[in-house]
Amino acid sequence: QVHLVESGGGLAQPGGSLRLSCVISGSPMKNYQIAWFRQAPGKEREAISCIRNNDASTDYLDSEKDRFTISRHNAENMVTLQMNRLKPEDTGVYFCAADRWYCTELEDEFDFWGQGTQVTVSS
């Protein structure tokens, strides 16, 4: 069983930065593609970014690709999401998820999920 735990959320001002972490346990992270999803208040969960296990290639939501960076830290079994130039519309619960086979925007494809970390961007 794969277990994912997110951390790093909190309150940030517009224009500020946050670094989210997702620690994976129970199975080697190298076996999985890891994605970040966001659920804004009153909205459906959406895929933000994904990083592959074989070559560390990445996908991003178009609107975030210039502000967010996803990275794998294999020695620590961790994936991070560096979020810069934060906007109020970035507010939401951020989840990391793991899939054995694909990076995809379809949340139903992901087999394992963390509990989420709250990000609030407000002045």
Image (cartoon, rainbow, N blue to C red):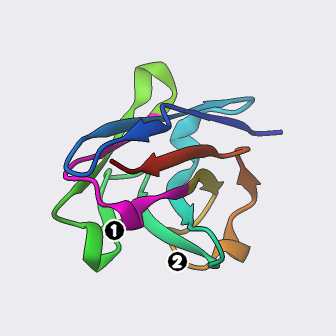
Q: State the image coordinates of residue 99 (x, y, percent, origin top left).
A: 63, 59
Which element is circle 1 on?
Answer: strand
Does the image show residue 80?
A: no
Residue behind mark 2: 105
Q: Is residue 37 magenta?
A: no
First in sequence, mark 1 or 2: give its number: 1
Asked if the residue under mark 2 is in contact with the one under mark 1, i.e. CB atoms within 8 Å, the reply is yes
Front one among 118 and 106: 118
Which amino acid, mark 1? Asp
Q: Which residue is mark 1?
A: 59
Which residue is at a point 52% across and 27% down the rendered structure image?
77
Task: Give the side of residue 81 with respect to residue 14, left or right.
Answer: right
Label 1 and label 2: CA atoms lie apart by: 9 Å
Picture quadrant of residue 111: bottom right
In terms of depth relative to the viewer, which is nearer, 53 or 49?
A: 49
Neighbour tally class for label 1: few under 14, some 14-19, many 20 plus, Cα within 10 Å: some
Q: Amino acid at mark 2?
A: Glu
Q: How many marks?
A: 2
The residue shown at (37%, 61%) is 88
| Label 2 secondary element | loop
The boundaries of the magenta stretch are 79-92
Quadrant in which the N terminus is drawn: top right
Tell me where residue 83 appears, x and y as whole percent. Answer: 29, 48
